[in-house]
Amino acid sequence: MPDLHLVRSDGSRTAFPQALDDGRPVALNFIYTSCTAICPVLSHSFAEFQRRLGPDRERVHMVSISIDPEQDTPRRLAEYAAHFEPGPQWEFYTGSAEASASLQRAFQAWFGGKMHHRPVTFLRAAPGQPWVRLEGFITPDELLVEYRRLVVPR
């Protein structure tokens, strides 16, 4: 994963991927705020996933990264996020166009720009562990099952 900086919706500049390495499992997706089809569905699934986790949600680091950083300022991301009532464990990021494209490429989620993006979600159990790629419109229940499969000891 490339070493770069992103900006959270609260305006703070953050080193990435170090921001993901706090020991918690990570659920990650790529969105943009003016999207009217895929992104609201992905964000709704994340919102419902966090609700279904209940008190365990604090143990998960949820990350949504803008694929339209020219339009998605921290303020605009914060306004978008408010519609989904994110807890403190769910962070929204923007940055430069180069940083956004670089991250999308690292996750093999670059499809030639925002108008060609696809629904994809990524999960990782812990730092150093492999990412699991979940293609398509994954439901909150499917996300919860996959999360538990990754992080709950057998």
Image (spheres, grey):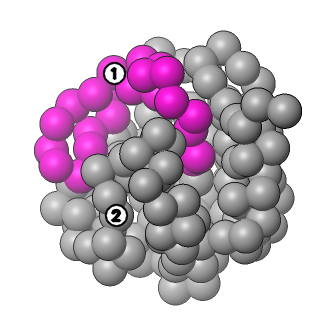
Q: Secondary structure at mark 2?
A: loop
Q: Earlier in the sequence, mark 2 or mark 1?
A: 1
Q: CA distance from mark 2 to mark 1?
A: 21 Å
Q: Nearer the viewer, residue 15 or 54?
A: 54
Give the residues in magenta: 5-28
Q: Is residue 63 above or below residue 21?
A: below
Q: Is residue 116 visible?
A: no
Find residue 124 and report its horizontal and vertical position in percent. 67, 34
Residue occupying the far bottom of the picture: 36
Q: Which residue is mark 1?
A: 15
At 34% from the left edge and 64% from the top edge, which residue is drawn? 86
Q: Nearer the viewer, residue 86 or 51?
A: 51
Choose top left, top right, bottom left or bottom right for residue 111.
bottom right
Q: Secondary structure at mark 1?
A: strand
Find residue 69 and report its horizontal and vertical position in percent. 36, 52
Q: Nearer the viewer, residue 32 or 96?
A: 32
Magenta run includes residue 14? yes
Q: Is residue 22 above or below residue 59?
A: above
Q: Is residue 146 above or below residue 83?
A: above
At 33% from the left edge and 41% from the top edge, which residue is drawn? 95
Pointer 2 and pointer 1: residues touching (CB < 8 Å)? no
Q: Which residue is mark 2?
A: 86
Tell me the number on the disc at residue 103: none
Q: Is residue 128 visible?
A: yes
- Number of residue marks: 2
Magenta run includes residue 151? no
